[in-house]
Amino acid sequence: MSVDITGAEILFRLPLGIVITETQVNMWIVMLVIAMLCKYLTSNLKIKPEGKRQVIAEYIVNLANKFIKDNMGPGFKNFPPFIAALFSISLFSSLLGLLGMYPPTADLNTTLGWAVVVFILILYYKFKTNGFGGYFKGLMEPLPILAPFNLIGEFSTPISMAIRLFGNISTGVVISALVYAALAWLSGVVFQWLPGTLANIPYLQLGLPAILSLYFDIFSSVLQSFVFCMLTILYISQASTKE
């Protein structure tokens, strides 16, 4: 087994030095699951809902629309699909830890890619609102000498977003793995007096890992996905405000 610099296992090596990692495979699995779920919820739609499936689909759409309207205003009616997709793919990716799979969000390549897309949108709305001249003028406020620091601050936005999500998810993966290994070792020490294969059963791995999973794999996954989307909403909203 070999891993790339992000810690994801390399599954295949193709010609020209191209590698296929756990991150890529698991991300495609997540996208496939989300696509199938969307297809299931939106098939055979009626003008008036007749089943729970359409009710759930309409509830999710209305919730996304209301969330964007309340936090970004009516001028961003086209944003609910983007934010909903960003939240769902982030959440489903992080929840793969529940299945013992490598979460794509524990790979910095994944979170940095999303953050770059958000950064491009931020720049787009800043240029759209203030123009190129207004944007570069804002970099020189309150003093022109501070322009380099303001520019660094601009590029720190996607980096901080990417590292925040990556750091929290990857930390959970590492801590869980360390706890599992420690409990397996401790179980072998405490129960070595048992006869035969009974001594090899990791008794102490029962219970505590499940509690850790509730936090790292569920609570933290939901929270960090929500925070990433809220930061996206906040930065884009601020970018669309005329300076």
Image (tube, rainbow, N blue to C red):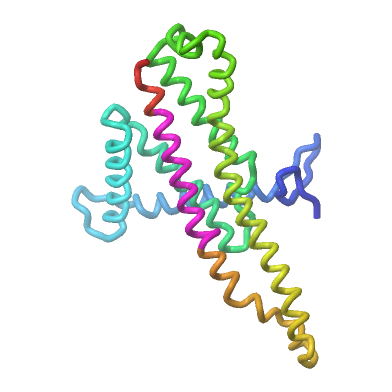
Residue 172 placement: quadrant = bottom right
Q: Position of residue 205 (x, y in %)?
A: 65, 75
Q: Say which residue appears at 51% left-offset and 65% top-offset.
A: 214
Q: Position of residue 95 (x, y in %)?
A: 53, 57
Start-end of magenta stretch: 215-236
Residue 231 on the magenta segment: yes
Up-down relation of residue 149 to residue 219 (above or below): above
Residue 34 or residue 158, whichever sits in front: 158
Residue 233 on the magenta segment: yes
Up-down relation of residue 19 to residue 183 (above or below): above
Residue 156 placement: quadrant = top right
Q: Position of residue 77 (x, y in %)?
A: 30, 32
Residue 199 or residue 78, whichever sits in front: 199
Give the left or right position of residue 23, taking residue 67 as reference: right
Give the left or right position of residue 180, taking residue 94 as reference: right
Up-down relation of residue 29 to residue 82 (above or below): below
Q: Position of residue 112 (x, y in %)?
A: 59, 36
Give the left or right position of residue 226, taking residue 53 as reference: right
Q: Say which residue appears at 41% left-offset and 21% top-offset.
A: 125
Identify the image quadrant of the N terminus. bottom right
